[in-house]
Amino acid sequence: MASGSNSRLQLNLLLVVMMTLYDVTALDVKSTSTYPSDNIKGRSAILNCAWTTSGSEEAGVLNIKKNETNYFTCTVYKTNSYSCVKNVPTSPDRFTTVNGVGNISMTIGTLECLDEATYACQVILFYPSGQFQQADTVLRIKIPPSVPALSIDQTEVIENSNINVSCTATLGYPNVGQIVWKTYQNGILFTPSPSDIIISSTNVVQPGDDICTVRNRSSVLLKTSRNNPNISLACFVINQDFPAPSDDACTNPTAQWCNLTATVNIVYPVSNIQSTIVPSTALYEGDDIFLRCSVEANPLPTFTWTKVDDYRTLTSEMDGLVSVLRLTNLNVSTDPGDYNCTASNVVKGVRYTASRVITLIINKATTPVPTTTNTQNRTVTSAKTTPRTEITTPGLNIEVADTNPDKVTIIAMGDCPCTRKLAERKPHIYDQPERPTQYEYINDSNYKSVEL
């Protein structure tokens, strides 16, 4: 036996024959679309067996085996026009051979999961008689994932309820794929609290699925909050055999194997109503002030201002969740009292209301306090506000009042030695024609309000 002679059977392995003057290389598996080894289901694979001899060696027979079953026997003795015979009559017609010089290739058309196996190329020498060598390779099918299909019926949910969405997709070959969820608020990725999200999954089977195809349905229950409005979710199929572009956003479903829900609107009734007086100092006749009322609500509320025991509706300005009522040239006779701000919205067909009462105490106008006057004596008056919440349903009217209403403190200067007279009153923007008065008017320049 001459040493150092080599032959190659192309498929990733190099085998050395100890008792002959030739080598046989490993069996090579090729894909017709992505050479050399992306054996994708539905495409073709080529298994190539090549050999060389040296000196007086002659190859006589080549066997191509699948899991130790001899599929083809080819006679190669003293000819380059080899003759191959199919040894398994029931083998699919998808298995064919192509002869070359010093090699024979077997083509498997339209790959199926059942084609997964260990394939061997066995070369038997005619001379020296009985000597042989074999090279093996393993063929594993790759299953492309699919773009996931989403199922969600909700476009609007009440806060603290759940968004329920499911995603179904082909993951590919067993244990190489999974579904991953991402959540967004106003289109920006965020991570919910673990206590607010539940993810479950189960494998599903559809007609036509092969034994090596895994299809999965993943479902999410996400608890909503007014602090996380405008929620959307996306599911991504992650597959080791078919890596997709890495991106936090689902912008190209076909390339990324992903799907994105529409935005879900989080709605909630009017609540947390607040009110303020601007400015928050003592009020005097002739002053101009703003009554400000704000709430939390979605959808946006409507506001109504009324004066208790006065049946007029006052005109205000609204900006989203805030309403402002402007009162000009306060009158000590007609303007003191309770002002009611009512906000309301409709959530899932039910109207909700919340109210806040502001009590105005207006002091008579005074002349300026002398600089030498002792100002330590002060009169402190409080304007009390009372929030109320009303929920209106058919046949039901519930009103709840706070037990500890907030207080807005108003401080006025007292014990002034000057003569107090009323200033001239200008009409309100919402008033009826001004009624006659018996007060003696003085010029505005003779007095001013005192702010602390």
Image: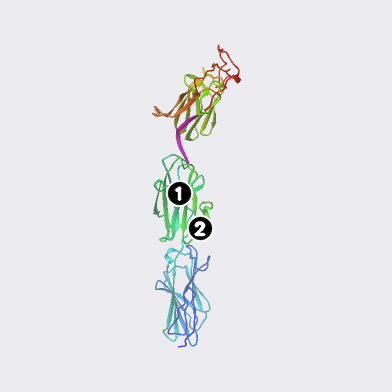
- Could you say whether the residue bearing mark 1 is in a helix, strand or loop? loop
- Percent position of residue 195, x then y: 39, 47
Q: Residues within 10 Å of mark 1 (few under 14, many from 20)?
A: few
Segment tinted magenta in the rendering: 265-276
Residue of label 2: 244
Whichever of labels 1 and 2 marks the residue nearer the N terminus, that label is 1
- Nearest the camera: 128 or 95? 128
- Could you say whether the residue bearing mark 2 is in a helix, strand or loop? loop
- Percent position of residue 190, x then y: 47, 48
Colour mapping: rainbow
Residue of label 1: 191
Q: Quadrant of residue 206?
A: bottom left
- Percent position of residue 275, x then y: 48, 30
Q: CA distance from mark 1 to mark 2?
A: 22 Å
Query: Which residue is farthest front?
Result: 372
Image quarter of the N terminus: bottom left
Instruction: In the rendered view, tell whether residue 196 sits above or below residue 452.
Output: below
- Percent position of residue 267, x then y: 46, 37
At label 2, the amino acid type is Ala
Instruction: In the rendered view, tell whether residue 181 sits above or below residue 127.
Output: above
Q: Quadrant of residue 125?
A: bottom left
Question: Which numbered tag is attached to residue 44?
Answer: none
- Nearest the camera: 362 or 417? 417
Query: Which SS type dominates the magenta stretch?
Result: strand
Asked whether 272 falls inside the magenta stretch, the response is: yes
At label 1, the amino acid type is Thr
